[in-house]
Image: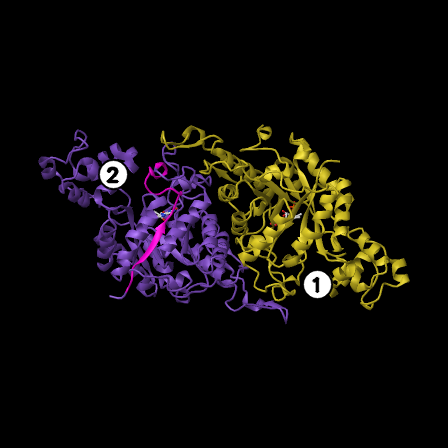
Chain colours: A purple, B yellow
Amino acid sequence: MNKKMLIGLCYGNGYGFQSGAWRMPGVDPKSYGDFDVVVKHAQAAERGKFHFVFLPDAFGRLADVENEPPAETLDVMLTLGAIARETSHIGLLATASTTFNEPYNVARQFKALDVMSHGRAGWNAVTSSSNDAAANYGVNIPSSEDRYGRAHEAVQLVQALWGSWGCDAWVHDQASGVFAKQGQIRPINLQGKYVGSRGPLYIPPSEQGQPIIVHAGGSHNAHELAGRFASVVIGAVFTIEDARAQREAFRAAAKCYGRDPDEIKFFAGIMTTITKDRRTALDRRIQLTENHFSQRIAYLQQMLGIPLYENPLDEPLTKEQLANARPSPYDPRSANALKIAKEGWSLRDIIAHGVIDYHPVIVGPGVEAADHMQEWFEAGACDGFWILPDVFHDGIDAFVDEVVPILQERGLFHKDYEGKTLRENLGVPDQYGIDPRLKK
Amino acid sequence: MNKKMLIGLCYGNGYGFQSGAWRMPGVDPKSYGDFDVVVKHAQAAERGKFHFVFLPDAFGRLADVENEPPAETLDVMLTLGAIARETSHIGLLATASTTFNEPYNVARQFKALDVMSHGRAGWNAVTSSSNDAAANYGVNIPSSEDRYGRAHEAVQLVQALWGSWGCDAWVHDQASGVFAKQGQIRPINLQGKYVGSRGPLYIPPSEQGQPIIVHAGGSHNAHELAGRFASVVIGAVFTIEDARAQREAFRAAAKCYGRDPDEIKFFAGIMTTITKDRRTALDRRIQLTENHFSQRIAYLQQMLGIPLYENPLDEPLTKEQLANARPSPYDPRSANALKIAKEGWSLRDIIAHGVIDYHPVIVGPGVEAADHMQEWFEAGACDGFWILPDVFHDGIDAFVDEVVPILQERGLFHKDYEGKTLRENLGVPDQYGIDPRLKK
Ligand SMILES: Cc1cc2nc3c(=O)[nH]c(=O)nc-3n(C[C@H](O)[C@H](O)[C@H](O)COP(=O)(O)O)c2cc1C
Ligand SMILES: Cc1cc2nc3c(=O)[nH]c(=O)nc-3n(C[C@H](O)[C@H](O)[C@H](O)COP(=O)(O)O)c2cc1C
C-alpha cells in the first residue's frame, strides 16, 4: 500500500483541548490571544509535516469561563494571517459560517489569505445550527432546509467570485502598460434565493488557484453539501465502523455529483495525551480534567447502565458491576468504556482514559497513537486524522517527536511536503471557479 | 504653540496613488497582493513616526483594470494583521462598511486586531453609498436614512460588544483555577431597528481597551455619526476655508453629543510627489499620469471656463486665455488651477501640478510640503494630514526623509511616539464599551 495518511492539527485558544491546559506547568496563562504563542504552535506542527492547521469557530461560546478559557482563537482569519507569514508549507483551514457571513466577504477574505500564504488556504464552509450563534446576530436560527439551501448557494457564489478574475488575466506588463486583460475579469451575476452577487472579485489567482472547500458535519444534508463541494471533511466519529459508514456516505454523495470519491478526504479526530508510558499519561489527564470528574462519572453510569456514585475513585469496578454492565446503544463510546473498565483500571483511571470525550482518545506512549492510526487508516475508516492535543505547549511537540517518526518509519506518513500548495500536499485536484462538472 | 500635527499614511494596492505607479523604475509589477511589500512600506512609515496606516475599502472597484491596478489591498484585515506582527508602534486603521457587515463580525475582527497589535487598531466605520458596492451583495443601495440609521446602531452595538468582556474580568489565576470572572462578562442584549446582538464578545480588553472609531464622509449625516462616535475623521477638502468649515461642523456635532470637540481629530489629505526640485517632480508626475492627460485637459477647460483643446501642451496659456479665465464655482480646485496657470507653466505642467486630483497636491521639494502643512495646521484647518504618496516604493521614504525632519525641526511634529497604543499616540481619551455620555 503506497497511499499515505494525512494529518492536520486542530487549533484553538492557545492552551489545548483539555479544560485544565491553561494551568499546566510551563504554560503562560496569558496565551489566550497571544499571537507569538499561536505562531510557535503552528511552527511546531509544520516541523512535524502536518498538512494543515484547522481552526473551528464556535462564536465564542463561553461555557464555563470562570474555570475554562473560550475554546477558540480570537479571530480565525487574523490567526491564519499571522501563521501564513511565519510558516512556509502548512495548510491553513478556517471555519466561516455560511449562515452568518455574506458570500462576498468570505470570498475576498479567503482568497486574500490564499494569495498571502502562496496557496495554502481552505474554507470550512459550515452551517451554524445553534441558537447561541444566531443570538450574536440578533436573530433565530433558520431551519435546516434554509441553512443548507443558503450554504449551497453561498459556496457556489464564493467559488464563482474566486474564478471571476480569469486565470491568465493578470499580465502586469510594465513595458506595454497592460495591467490586466479586462475582458478576462468578468462579473458573475448570480442571484439565488438566499444570496447573490454581481462581482467580479478583484483578486488574482493564488499559487493553488483558489482555496479548497472543507466541510464539518454528519447529517444527510452535510453529506450532500460536502459531496458536492468539499475536498476535506472534518469528521466526528468514535468507532471504525461508524467512520467507514460516514466516509462512504460522503464518497457516495461525491459520486452522485459526478466526482471521483477519492477527491474527498475524510478526517477522523483523535485527542492525544502522549507521554513515555500509560501511567504518566493517565496522571497527566487526571491533572488536566479534575474539574470534570463528577460530571463524567454521571455520564459513565449511563453509558454502562450501572450506578457508580458510591464507588471509590481509587478502585476498579466490582466483579458484580462489570457483570451487570451493558454498553448503552445510544452512546457509541460505551463499548470502549466497558473494555477499559474490564482491564481493571480504577474508576479514576477509567475516566482518565478519556472514555468520555469528543473523539477517540490516546493516553499513552506514541506507539499507541501510531497503532490506532494505522488500524483505522488500513481499515478504510479515514484518509487522515485531525489531532486535538491536550496541551499545545508540549502536546504538539510530543506528537511530532513520538508519533510522527513511527508513522514515517512504517511508510504511513510522508517524510516531507510534496509541494508548496495545500492542493499539492493533500493531493486535491486543481479547480478554478465553479467545478465545471457541477454546472448543469 | 505646543500642539503638534498628526500624520497618517493612506495605503492601498502596493504601488501608489498615481495610476502609473506600477510601471515606475524599481517597482515590482507583482506588488499587488505581495505582503512582503506591504510590510516594507508600513515599516517605512513607522520609521517616519507616522501615527497610522489607513486602509480604504472600495469593494474592488475595477475602474480601468486594463491599464491600472485596483486601488485597494486584497483584504484590509489580513493586511493590517501582517503589519501588526512586523511593526511596533504605528496605528492600524481599516475601513469596514456598516452597510454590508454584521456588527458581530466587525466587533470580533477589530477587537482581535487590537489585541494582536497591542492596542493599535481603529475602525473606519463608513456607510457605503454606491450601487457598485451593493451589487457585490446582490442588493440595491439603501437610502441615506437607512444607511445612517443602521450605522448609528452598528457602531453602538460594536462598542457594546467590545465592552462586554469586563475590564478586570480576565484574572487567569493558575493557582486558584479562576480563568475569568463570569459575572463581569455580560451579554449586551441590544436590538435595534436594523441590527441586534446578544453577545457577550469573548475577547478581553486590548492594551488600549478597544479600537478607536474613525469616520470618512462629509455630509450632514456624516457630521452627526462622527460627532457622536469618532476620534478621527478622514476628510476630503481642497482649501483651508473648506477644511475649517468641515472641521468646525464635526467639532460642533461632537459638542452636541456632550463631547469635548478636541476629542475629534480632523485629517486633511495631501497627495505627494517629493523630489529635490519642482522640475524633477513635475517630470515624475508627467510620467505617472500620462494615461489621464486628455481627460484632465477636458476638466481644466470646465474649471477655467475657457477652451483648451487646441492649446499646445508645451506652451503656457495665452494672455487672452488667462484674462478670460473664470474659476468655476462648482469645483473648489479651480482657484488653485488658475493661480498655477498664471505662474506661466505650460499646459502639461499645469496638469502635472495636480490641479485636478482628489486632494491638494504637493509637487516639489520637501519644504513645500512642510510649508503647506504648517499653513493649514496653523490656520486651524485640520489636526493632521493623511498622506497619499504617488509611488509607495520610494514616495514614503521621500516624505520621511525630506518632509518629516523639517516638520520636526519646526516643532510641528513629534520626534518619537508618545506611547505604545494608538490612543496614547493620537491623544484620544480612554473608552471601554459605549461612551457613558451617550447613554441617555
Ligand atoms: C467535527 C465537526 C466540527 C464542526 N465545527 C464547527 C465549527 O467550527 N463552527 C460551526 O459553526 N459549526 C461547526 N460544526 C457544526 C456543523 O457544521 C453543523 O452545524 C452541525 O453538525 C449540525 O449539522 P446539521 O444541521 O447538518 O445536522 C462542526 C461539526 C462537526 C461534525
Ligand atoms: C475621504 C473619504 C474617504 C472615504 N473612504 C471610503 C472607503 O474607504 N470605503 C467606503 O465604502 N466609503 C468611503 N467613503 C465614503 C463615505 O463613507 C460615504 O459613503 C460617502 O462620502 C457618501 O456619504 P453621504 O451618504 O454621507 O453623503 C469615504 C469618504 C471620504 C470623504
Identify the chain of the residue marked 1, using the numbered disc in the image: B
Q: Main secondary structure of the magenta part?
A: loop
Seen in the picture, residue A295 relative to B26 is either above or below; the reply is: above
- Which residue reaches farthest bottom? A176
Q: Residues within 10 Å of mark 1 (few under 14, many from 20)?
A: some
Q: Nearer the viewer, residue B10 or B164?
A: B10
Task: From the image, tell me which residue sits under label 1.
Answer: B289
Left or right of A91 on screen, residue A344: left
Secondary structure beneath label 2 = helix
State if disc 2 and disc 1 touch (CB < 8 Å).
no
In front: mark 1 or mark 2?
A: 2
Q: Is mark 2 within 8 Å of ligand 1?
A: no
Residue A9 appears in the figure: yes
Task: Measuring from the top left, give residue A179's x and y in whole percent.
Answer: 60, 66
Q: Which mark is residue A283?
A: 2
| Quadrant, the N terminus of chain A | bottom left
Q: Nearer the viewer, residue A421 or B132?
A: A421
Residue at 26% from the left image edge and 50% from the top image edge: A237
Q: Residues within 10 Å of mark 2 (few under 14, many from 20)?
A: some
Task: Measuring from the top left, give residue B106's x and y in whole percent.
Answer: 51, 44
